[in-house]
Amino acid sequence: MEKEKISTLRVQSIAFSHNGHIPPQYTCEGENFNPAVEISNVPPDTKTLALIMEDPDAPRGIFVHWLLWNLTPHNPIVEKTNQGISGKNSFGKIGYGGPCPPSGTHRYYFRVYALDVALDLETGANKDSLIEAMKDHILASGELMGLYSKKGKNNL
């Protein structure tokens, strides 16, 4: 049986636009708290949402900044909150870790997934565990990408 085509979520933030610059308060140069994220076009049979925020431009490969799952489908992710269940980021901490590129302008992807189940994952699980748990349960996905470079370090 062929799996239905995955639909597209609309992912946006009042803090920055898609391909726009992430304000410093959400980074290591500011207060380092999460921005608000709004998700729409959620399929009606969605049970939970999951979020993966990562930087593909990090010197040692993809750097995970934030993992969340078992989010309520029709509620926004509120600024400065710890909603759902949080995983371990590449800083070695649980929860949000804001952009902090060593040099140049980096891209930060906020990828959101609509799932047909609540995930049975413990707090602190890593990205690989989250991706494995989501397998065959994704109804829709979407992304928001923001840019950030430290002050005075815009060169790539």
Image (cartoon, rainbow, N blue to C red):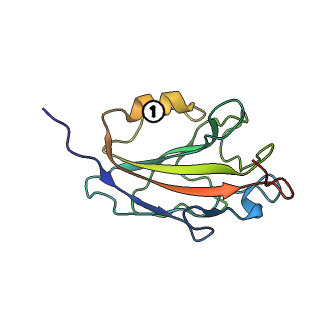
**Residue furthest out toward the left:** 1
Where residue 90 sits, quadrant-wise, is top right
Please give the name of the residue rendered at 70% of the width and 29% of the height, measured from the top-left corner. Answer: 60
Report x, y in % for residue 72: 43, 55
- Number of dots carrying numbers: 1
Please give the name of the residue rendered at 54% of the width and 60% of the height, measured from the top-left corner. Answer: 77
Q: Is residue 137 left or right of residue 63?
A: left
Where residue 88 sits, quadrant-wise, is top right
The N terminus lies in quadrant: top left
**Residue furthest out toward the bottom:** 14
Residue sitting nearer the eye, 110 or 36: 110
Q: Amino acid at mark 1?
A: Ile
Instruction: Provide the secondary structure element on which disc 1 rests.
Output: helix
**Residue furthest out toward the right:** 152
User: Compared to 51, does 38 lie above or below?
Assistant: below
Circle 1 residues within 10 Å: few <14, some 14–19, many ≥20: few
Q: Which residue is mark 1?
A: 131
User: Compared to 97, does 11 lie above or below?
Assistant: below
Report x, y in % for residue 87: 59, 37
Please give the name of the residue rendered at 34% of the width and 63% of the height, measured from the top-left corner. Answer: 41
Report x, y in % for residue 96: 67, 48
Residue sitting nearer the eye, 135 or 104: 104
Report x, y in % for residue 151: 85, 58
Residue sitting nearer the eye, 20 or 78: 20
